[in-house]
Amino acid sequence: MSNIPDVSHFSSLDNKRLIESDKAHYMHGYHAFDEHRQHGSLNITQGDDAYIRDAQGQQYLDAVGGMWCTNIGLAREEMAQAIAEQTRQLAYSNSFCDMANDRAIQLSEKLAELAPGDLDRVFLTTGGSTAVDTAIRLVHYYQNCRGKHEKKQIITRINAYHGSTYLTMSLGGKQADRPEEFDFLTDGIHHLSCPNFYRAPEGVNEAEFLEGLVAEFENKILEIGPERVGAFLAEPIMGSGGVIIPPAGYHRRMWEVCQRHDVLYISDEVVTSFGRLGHFFASEAEFDIQPDIITTAKGLTSGYQPLGACIFSERIWEVIAEPGAGRCFSHGFTYSGHPVACAAALKNIEILEREALLPRAREVGRYFEQRLRTLEDLPIVGEVRARCFMACVEFVADKTTRTLFPEALNIGEWVHLRAQKRGLLVRPIVHLNVMSPALTLTHEQVDFVVDVLRESILETLEDLR
Ligand code: PLP
């Protein structure tokens, strides 16, 4: 953390008061209430490149990348300048009706240029959830415009994550965890199996597993009726679900099923775009598909501003915006096309291109994958799943049977806490440690991540005895 001032003097009293205030007023999503009451939170006050520092001055290499999002790294002066300049020039303007602003227009043009095929139309949103929500509304709108009013059922996968609004949380298949705590929409949403080969039935090889998944999809469409299925929604690699890398050819085969049954393919690239997998968009470059709709957010601004986008095909546009039909898409958010957020995205893309961070991510990403896989020799590491700058370590109580530790043990948290005290942050999700660091990570920093993880897992093993 060379180029930011040390504010660790801000610790003790001020921080103690803030921690108490945090407990008293600030409700965090996904933080167990009892944990929060007892231990409070880690108050982060500074960030620089791949590092963050807490209020006590403790520095961490943030292998979480904020939340899959700090792609170009933190504390970039030119990002601060672009944001400040835009704030001075035009801090806000809406994108409703006939209103537009330079930055929103420029960003839409740039996204159309970067997105695959004829994905030339852009609707700007406030983040990933609103991008996915927009995509579903667009599917419904499109089908209505075609007179296919029944064709609106959406098929997704168990263990997917598509956001935290009522609709997007229902689309994700993770609700099975605690169904008693939240209500979910069930009408019009169907879930397929998660394409996790590590959890495939015993004796099934990868090719058979793939055939089973494709057949399940096609059968599901036939069961619902192709005339009722509007879209298939999938992350290229499931992120929060545990970096699930599907069997080779999976997306292409699922896309072909969509083509056969006139089902739109929505690729949720909120995590996988803007370099995380070494490309601006992974759908075509990594998975050989041309989706009808791509949703993105996170790395779009590298977290410097909240922003998302729903990018869709000219084919959809031609139907919904048929000349003379007199329609308009009655949808939008106050902060759609926010000029400051769009200025941040434009500068972020400029940096990704100028510094050739995408090819760099592919190169260092390969090293990251290889080094992480060396952890598989440890007795509680069941599998390391890694592709470029998305990675996950899955812990198991028994490597042969792949049996998990009891959920209440929270094994991911055990390793995470031991890594944290060594200056590394990973994201614990029950029996997983998930990682998505800044794309600027060096080979030495990769070594640090893997070495610290090894020590932390070994210490966990000792403590478990
Ligand atoms: N889609 C995917 C694949 C995500 O991983 C996320 C967030 O992690 C979202 C959508 C929701 O994005 P946001 O939190 O910006 O609303």
Image (spheres, rainbow, N blue to C red):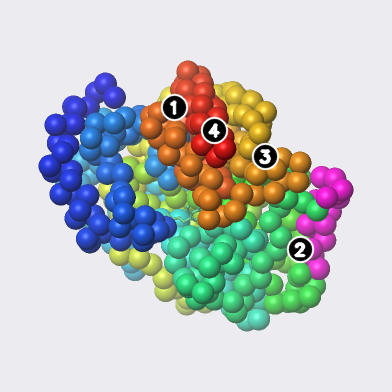
Q: Earlier in the sequence, mark 2 or mark 1?
A: 2
Query: What crowding class fits label 2: few (fewer than 14 Cα within 10 Å), some (14-19), or many (20 or more)?
Result: many
- The amino acid on which the numbered mark 4 sits, given as a three-letter code, is Glu
Choose the circle earlier in sequence order: 4 or 1.
1
Q: Is residue 316 left or right of residue 332?
A: right
Alpha carbons under labels 3 and 2: distance apart: 28 Å
- Residue 382 numbered tag: 3
Judge whether residue 315 is colored magenta: no
Mark 4 = which residue? 462
Which of label 1 and label 3 is nearer to you? 3
Look at the numbered disc 3 and give the secondary structure of its residue.
Answer: strand
Q: Which residues are magenta?
A: 202-219
Residue type, mark 3 in image: Gly
Give the Cα distance between marks 4 and 2: 44 Å
Between circles 3 and 4, the one closer to the viewer is: 4
Residue positioned 18% across, 49% down in the render: 18
In-front residue for pair 31/309: 31
When the figure is inspected, residue 53 is found, relative to residue 199, above or below; the finding is: above
